[in-house]
Image (cartoon, coloured by chain):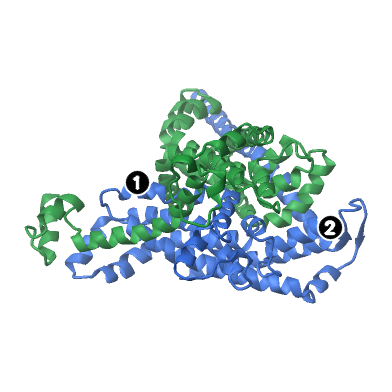
Chain colours: A green, B blue
Amino acid sequence: MASENTTVRQASDDGPSKYLDTDRLFGEDTSLRKALLVYGGLFVYFLWFLVPVVWLALSTIKSGEIIQAQRLIIIPMGENFTLGHFEQVLTDPQFRQLFVNSTIIAFSTVALTLFLGILGAYSLSRFDYPGRSTLLVSFMATKMLPPALIIVPFFLMMYSYSLVDTYLGIILAHSIRALPLALWFLKGFFDDIPKALDESARIDGCSHFRVLYHIIIPLALPGIAVAGFYTFVTSWNDFLFVSVLSQGGGTRTLPYGLYMFQSQTSINWGATITAATITAVPSIVLFALVQNEIVEGLASGGMHGS
Amino acid sequence: MASTEATLKDRVTRFSREADWYSRETWVGYGLVIPATLLMLLIIVYPTVRAVWMSFHQRSFLSPEESTWVGIANYEALLEDPVFTQAFVHTIIFTVGAVVAMYVLGLGLALLLRNNLPGVGYLRSLSMVPWVIPPVVIVIIWTWMFQVDYGLVNLISQQFGGPNKYWFGDYDLALPLVMMLRVWKDTPFVAIALLASMQSIPPEYYEAAKIDGAGAVQQFRHITLPNISYISMVMIVTEVIAAFNSFQMIYIATGGGPVNQTEVLGTYVYQQAFGEYMLGYAAAVGIVMLALLTLFTAVYIKVENTE
């Protein structure tokens, strides 16, 4: 290692002593100028990414008078500050119903998708049979179908099975949207587990289900977390399928409720943005829990396809 | 003699046992993947086939039991429908514009996030925030930013003597704005995927290039770009399909307006089906979308493979 570093330093024009302090701060290959450029570039990106989000979050604690004031108030203080919007939204029975519906549907979707996905990915990763790779490609190809195209016959089908206005109809729709990518992620993670491990367990007389339960699932837990997160977000964030499959209203979820809030002619902005902020929180918190695995999952999922 | 017979018999049984084991394994393999496959067939493939069938019929939500065969009349009507043509053009502009922007911006972000400077590790995760926010919330965030009088954009714009208006209602700006929502949401995803791909490039490549005297631009062109070309293809295909199929954010943000300026094929199908109750016509538009996407993907993969 040490010898390699010396070669690199000699290759660059700058003597090591000149940038001694920045060396310690930024690593030896990075000059102060480069560091400033990187931070400057990132600053511009994050202005664009985060200012709207922070502005929304700050607006939820602004009192009714200043939330629509024609002057720039960034952080509300004193009488401008209120938790009234949160109180209003959280005590609203309609909002609670939407939240409960969203939660039931998202968790059921995750359970169903992971159950089917883990079995399917185990099969695609560990067995060799005719049609295996075609099957994998076909699963991915369904992602190409325009949702707007399948929604009409899908609605008619659900209608004929009396699954409109039921949780089950929405859960099935969401599971199908999430399953192809969940399968792909899971297969990628399963492929990383050495085959020798489960083959020796098989020789010792373990059944496939015991291999799956005692070897594959514990070792692929980070991958299962990624697939679970992706499935949760697919379901929690969906508007299209819920809007079509919830004719009555008993199964409406948060995105659909928000859509109705914001399409009214006189919008109650305080309540709307507060409800929107609360809706975004579960997705963000779950992401924070699995962020490291997501980056790895993207890397390994991509690599396996090559 | 007796011993050879015994070994032969042994070998036959062992062979048949093995063959038996293999075929049983195959069936277990099929068995495990069948539940997922069945569900996909039932809930995706069957409706798609039904949609093809519907596109040759006239059918209305008002009387969903009735359906008359009209041949290719729906497709002929498409060609003479000015709103369809508009929606088609908007979809192409939206898709090309959004995907080019998110790829260029995503590549730039990945190159920045790649530096191991203090704090950059946290920014990698933080950059994904737009990607995980529900689309409906994204629309609320940005329509709130652009509100007349009290939206942040108008507050700032007025400081500099700029206009004070609801920008999503602007005839010329509505389409670029809904494109921006899409780019805002997916740029981080593209960036993190490209970053992951860049991090798997062996550092020795760069060290060797440096010794040979290659500058930053040359290293980028000859080492970074070729090594991320596979992930770039995956990302571009995925994002083109997603942008082409866009529906949610556009529908919620503008509903296709003002005066059809943000009408794309996705919103047009929805509008025809659930607004006008023209199921057959909506299905025909959807089938055209599917055909175009299939063509694009086939051509792209072919081009990529020959390179």
A42 or A75, nearer to the observer: A75
**Residue A68 in sight in this render:** yes
A186 or A163, nearer to the observer: A163
Tell me what residue is drawn at x 69 percent, y 43 percent.
Answer: A173
Indicate which disc, 1 or 2, sits on the residue closer to the N terminus: 1
Tell me what residue is drawn at x 56 percent, y 54 percent.
Answer: B144
Judging from the image, mark 1 belongs to the subunit labelled B
Judging from the image, mark 2 belongs to the subunit labelled B
Label 2 SS: loop
| Residue B234 drawn at (x, y percent) | 50, 59
| Residue A302 drawn at (x, y percent) | 45, 52
Q: Quadrant of residue A162?
A: top right
A95 shown above or below A53: above
Tell me what residue is drawn at x 80 percent, y 45 percent.
Answer: A157
| Residue A254 drawn at (x, y percent) | 64, 41
Q: Which residue is mark 2?
A: B277
Q: Which residue is mark 1?
A: B122
In the image: residue B16, left or right of residue A161:
left
Q: Residues within 10 Å of mark 1 (few under 14, many from 20)?
A: few
B69 shown above or below A187: below
B41 shown above or below B265: above
In the image: residue B162, left or right of residue A95:
left
A32 or B49, nearer to the observer: A32
Q: Amino acid at mark 1?
A: Tyr
Q: Amino acid at mark 2?
A: Tyr
| Residue B70 drawn at (x, y percent) | 89, 66
